[in-house]
Amino acid sequence: MVKNFIIQHRLPDTVLSRFQYVIDFINAHPLKPTNLFFIVDNQLVDKDLFYGNSHGDFFNIPLDACFLDETKVLNHYHSTQFSYLQEHSCFAVSDKKIGGDQFIQNTQFGFDILNTLFFHISRYEEYYAPTSKNGPAGWLDEKQHFLIKNNLCPDPVVDQLLVAFFEIITDNEIKQRTTYAISHDVDILFRFKPSYKLFRSLAATVVQQRGWSQFWDSIGYYKKMMLQEVQDPYDYFDKLFRLEDQWVSKQIFMMAGGNTKYDNKYRIGNSDSKKIIQLAIERGYSIGLHPSYNAGFEASRFEEEQKTLTNISQQTIIANRQHWLRWSWEITPYLFEKNGIITDSTMGYSRHLGFRCGTGFPYQMYDFKGKKAFNWTENPMGFMESAAIHQAYQTGENLTELMRNFILKNKKNTHLMLNFHNSNFDPLLDTGRQLRHFYENELMDLCYS
């Protein structure tokens, strides 16, 4: 039997669209008990929760709608309104409670949960960030992110917050196994093919001062490749494309054009690209678009590349992940709306493992212009091996331990979109060798044991 959980509020009209968006997000959240449904109704006398500092024998959430209020644009680099997110230990989640008495006393919650949810899932701080704070990808520089600055990004804080909330109002424990999806961005096919790439690679080894041992190792490996004793260092596709059917989804994201130095590492119409696409389809993968560096900012280029990939793959291209995670809040999400993209999985970090949106689960992002949810669904990318490589380099952590610990830390009550690039499994590099061992021998046990 479904329990309608009645919410009443004292909110001005200026915040109602954002407030309803949060309630819709809660109702769609996979960890919500199936027999529970949240309804906003200010007409009924009876209520289960009041939003706005009213007291009684029902639950109460205090109102601090600084992010919900669309009449305000807060400069969070200076505004004290952001301090409440730090002052309340609302992210240090144990099995059932958050921050002890600061989270709940009797029936009174200690801070504005709904406001906090909107802050994270809408990417408020990114949308309103001044251009001067943006990184090369076009969005708020990672070092400026609230979750990264406060070392909270390894935790799905939104999922944890909702678990604690659901457990308190139902008095039932929520403990679900994490689900997993796997994906691959194909930025470059081969390291030494065609042959001129060998000389380019050797020159890079010298210029970047990687050492003469790697120089000679590359030559030796190339000789073995010419004798057909080994594959090109980046030709890892047979192992990369998983055969298992436990994954919630399996996707590869292919490039189909470009006009910068970051693009055109291969031609989508050549025989090698077609073989890779066919192998992926045979292994149960769907094909998604990995737009070129500028395509997420240029409508005609995005549309052209989507059409090209559709023709080559013979699949309807409805999935997307931005190359370099490039994103313009004024342009990119509206290209998805216009071109029939149904799922995107760009919302991840390039240099940290973690939950950029506070949740690992797919959900509809907020359209600040339209004051409603977008039609497409974001599937946040919590784990990318290149981000782990960057993080391990910066912190001095062992790469394998870093990846292993992150997955073990998030074995329950979330979803993980995993991403691996074929070009990072280079056996000539120590990181490539570590990744091969991890991917072939540990990943499935970590996720499904």
Image (spheres, rainbow, N blue to C red):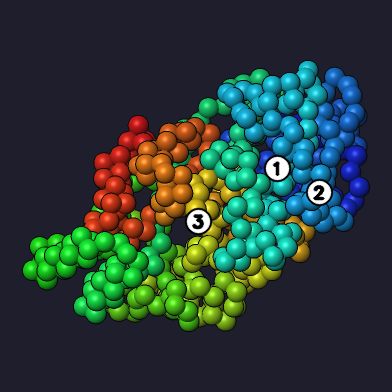
Residue 326 position in % (x across, y down)? 55, 66
Nearer mark to the viewer, of 2 and 3: 2
Label 1 sits on a secondary structure element that is: helix
- Which amino acid, mark 2? Ser
Tell me where residue 396 sits by quadrant: top left
Q: Nearer the viewer, residue 431 or 161?
A: 431
Left-right relation of 310 to 356:
left
| Residue shown at 42% from the left, 50% from the top | 393
Which residue is under mark 1? Answer: 117
Disc 2 marks which residue? 79
Q: Residues within 10 Å of mark 3 (few under 14, many from 20)?
A: many
Residues at marks 3 and 1, CA–CA distance in whole angstroms: 23 Å
The disc placed on residue 160 is: none
Placement of 95 over or under 334, stated as above or below: above
Q: Residue at x 57, y 43 (%)?
A: 153
Task: Specify the quadrant that holds the N terminus.
Answer: top right
Q: Which residue is mark 3?
A: 350
